[in-house]
Image: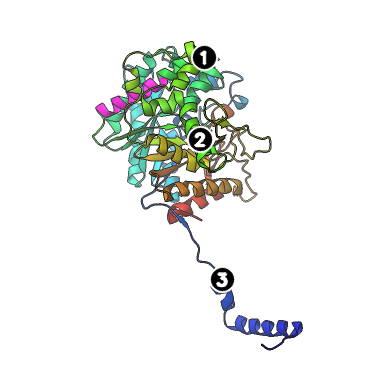
């Protein structure tokens, strides 16, 4: 081999590079080293959607015969929501729904998860249905179908009719829910294939009857909280049966539940098993009861004399078979193996744990994978959906009117990467609904927390796509995340 001095070596290379630059812009060596992009592809027909809920977007609270829900009463009670804000107008989707469908269309979304306001359909909770209220949802469904977007309907997303005495403390509310669910299923199932009974038991029971942050704003003793929880899962079961009895054959019934998701601290057998045990036990009053048709021994023992009073036949109703399970997944808990009689230990969160704009929204993208895997391994549902995932961010509107929410894009990219892992390992997760299509009334936090991929100016109701909307459009177009 010929000996080059350092200088000559440099010169020779420089000369070769310059010669190549003259013909092509990159030397062949660079082409050889550029990998072809490996997109994380989702299975064919994977369903991409967005989610919203009635009281958070509709406004028009006293139009066409609607009467108050407990959220109207609560939001109008001083001190209950951020700066006393209410859903009186919200996104005015009651009037602007066609525009919202256009937003979905321009994303390329295949599905839209929205909820029906019970007090629009039965303003007094029961009795005479209000046809004008139903007609609004007929219009929404028509508009979606015209645009090839599948409607996924949530029957209860927290806006309980104020008129129902005792709310979820009353067993009669479960019966009223079933009547409402059966009626809506009968009216809409010719064109709506997927129904969710409930959205997030813990959010409307524990936050409403235990911590009091949500309506009716009560802080009840444990026995009464457990009883309200039981009425809610009973309502779900009665609702499933009423939908099946009234809907077109083939209608798919499930729920959207924010089960606590446990991530093993290290992916070893012992911690993975611990995550499974934690999933069953920590979700005992809700998802476990619904999937198994019984309360776990652990739950009954822990609650002792405060355990719910269960009537004969209740648990069979609670455990009515489902066509799919929807999981709302935001923040995981980390869990390790045993050293406790329960067989798992939940790790405390450090003060440095990263989070998004909502104080509770800690980042843990593995939540997507473990939500699907834990639920699949424990109960083996035929089909799962991620019925909510997304984040609040401190969005800034630039001088020229753009919202460059790079933090939300980072959040979504990481979560979808972990969801991709679940699909690639063959778990039957069939779709993803991003929370939310647009900024909206974030419950007790009013309009102070923005979860949308479209920015809403609440003075003008103008919707503007954020960077994240453009990013999601690419994901949907490619059926893949990069
Ligand atoms: C869900 N947490 O609520 C609801 O289904 C939506 O209506 C809501 O806007 C969205 O998530 C964002 O908050 C949650 O404290 C509320 O873990 C609180 C929690 C999780 C979900």
Q: Nearer the viewer, residue 191 or 420?
A: 420
Q: Is residue 37 magenta?
A: no
Q: Which residue is mark 1?
A: 222
Which residue is the site of mark 2? Answer: 275
Residue drawn 35% across and 23% down?
318
* Local SS, label 3: helix
Q: Position of residue 327 (x, y in %)?
A: 44, 36
Is residue 22 shown above or below 412? below
Q: Are marks 3 and 2 in contact (CB under 8 Å)?
A: no
| Front of the two marks 3 and 2 | 2
Segment colored magenta: 232-245
> Horizontal and vertical percent for residue 28?
56, 78
Instruction: Using the rendered view, name the quadrant where residue 227 is placed.
Output: top left
> Measuring 47% from the left and 53% from the top, which residue is drawn there?
475
Q: Quadrant location of residue 446?
A: top right
Q: CA distance from mark 1 to mark 2?
A: 26 Å
């Amino acid at each position: 081999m010929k000996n080059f001095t350092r200088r000559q070596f440099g010169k020779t290379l420089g000369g070769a590079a310059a010669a190549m630059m003259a013909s092509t812009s990159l030397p062949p060596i660079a082409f050889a080293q550029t990998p072809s992009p490996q997109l994380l592809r989702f299975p064919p027909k994977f369903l991409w959607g967005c989610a919203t809920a009635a009281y958070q977007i509709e406004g028009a609270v006293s139009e066409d015969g609607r009467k108050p829900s407990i959220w109207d009463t609560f939001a109008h009670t001083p001190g209950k929501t951020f700066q006393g804000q209410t859903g009186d107008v919200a996104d005015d989707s009651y009037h602007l729904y066609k525009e919202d469908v256009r937003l979905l269309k321009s994303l390329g979304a295949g599905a839209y998860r929205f909820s029906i306001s019970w007090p629009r359909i039965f303003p007094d909770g029961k009795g005479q249905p209000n046809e004008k209220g139903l007609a609004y949802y007929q219009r929404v469904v028509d508009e979606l179908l015209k645009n090839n977007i599948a409607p996924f309907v949530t029957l209860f997303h927290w806006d309980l009719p104020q008129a129902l005495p005792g709310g979820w403390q009353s067993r009669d509310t479960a019966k009223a829910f079933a009547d409402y669910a059966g009626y809506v299923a009968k009216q809409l199932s010719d064109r709506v294939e997927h129904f969710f009974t409930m959205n997030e038991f813990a959010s409307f029971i524990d936050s409403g009857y235990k911590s009091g942050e949500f309506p009716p704003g009560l802080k009840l003793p444990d026995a009464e909280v457990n009883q309200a929880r039981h009425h809610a899962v009973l309502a779900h079961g009665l609702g499933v049966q009423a939908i099946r009895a009234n809907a077109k054959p083939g209608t798919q019934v499930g729920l959207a539940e924010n089960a606590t998701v446990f991530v093993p601290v290290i992916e070893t057998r012992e911690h993975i098993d611990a995550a499974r045990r934690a999933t069953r036990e920590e979700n005992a009053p809700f998802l476990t009861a619904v999937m198994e048709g019984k309360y776990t021994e652990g739950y009954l023992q822990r609650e002792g004399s405060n355990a719910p009073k269960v009537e004969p036949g209740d648990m069979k109703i609670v455990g009515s078979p489902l066509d799919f399970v929807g999981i709302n997944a935001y923040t995981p808990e980390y869990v390790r193996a045993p050293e406790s009689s329960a067989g798992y230990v939940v790790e405390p969160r450090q003060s440095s744990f990263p989070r998004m704009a909502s104080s509770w929204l800690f980042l843990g993208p593995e939540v997507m994978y473990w939500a699907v895997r834990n639920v699949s391994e424990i109960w083996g549902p035929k089909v799962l959906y991620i019925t909510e995932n997304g984040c609040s961010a401190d969005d800034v509107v630039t001088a020229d009117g753009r919202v460059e929410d790079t933090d939300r894009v980072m959040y979504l990219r990481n979560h979808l990467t972990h969801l991709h892992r679940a699909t690639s390992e063959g778990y039957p997760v069939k779709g993803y609904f991003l929370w939310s299509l647009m900024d909206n009334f974030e419950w007790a936090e009013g309009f102070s927390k923005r979860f949308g991929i479209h920015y809403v100016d609440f003075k003008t109701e103008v919707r503007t796509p954020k960077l994240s909307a453009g990013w999601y459009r690419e994901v949907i177009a490619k059926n893949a995340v990069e």
